[in-house]
Amino acid sequence: MLGVTSDNKLKRLIVVGDKILVKPKNPSDKTNSGLYLPPTVTEKEEIQSGYVIKVGPGYPLPAPTDDEPWKETEEKVKYMPLQAQEGDLAIYLQRHAIEVQYEGEKYVILPQASVLMLERFEDL
């Protein structure tokens, strides 16, 4: 599994909002009965899976309203964090995924709403 480390270029990427950067798993090109499928068949499947590489900060929350509007306050955006975490295996809807190439690798960017299920490899 590919992750974000201090020595790779993925550290420079910033994912915004409720988006998730996923490295798709290589789908099996063979059926259970042993028939080989062309790449166009496996890429067009509606549900795909891959490893979460980076996640955005989450959904922005509205600022609380004060009873004293004349009071100067510093606007700091607060976010509701996403459920997905780096290293999770995500099962997602392919139709909402946007494919991107970065440093010769294929990734997909998708909103958290497209993720159907996450598999976390640590104890909850």
Image (cartoon, grey):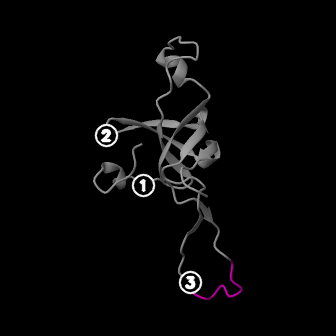
Which label sits on residue 14?
A: 1
Q: Which element carries disc 1, helix, strand or loop?
A: loop
For the residue pair 8 and 124, the one nearer the viewer reads as 124
Viewer-side residue, 4 vs 10: 4
Overall secondary structure of the magenta stretch? loop
The residue under label 3 is: 73
Q: Is residue 77 left or right of residue 100?
A: right
The structure residue drawn at horizontal position 58% and vertical position 17%, both measured from the top left corner, is 32
> Which residue is drawn at the image coordinates 46% and 53% (left, top)?
15
Mark 1 or mark 3: name the one nearer the start of the chain: 1
Which callout, 2 or 3, points at the residue further toward the start of the chain?
3
**Does the segment drawn in magenta span residue 69?**
yes
- In this picture, is 88 found above or below 23? below
Position of residue 48 measured from the top left corner of the image (x, y, whole percent): 57, 32
- Give the residue type that dot 1 points to: Ile
Residue placed under numbered mark 2 in the picture = 103
Q: Nearer the viewer, mark 1 or mark 3?
A: 1
Looking at the rendered image, the quarter that the C terminus falls into is bottom right
Helix, strand or loop under label 2: loop
Q: Residue at x 60, y 46 (%)?
A: 118
Counting from the top left corner in percent of width and height, residue 2 is at 39, 44
Read off the magenta span.
Answer: 65-73
Q: Categorize mark 1 by other alpha carbons within 10 Å: few (<14), some (14-19), many (20+).
A: few
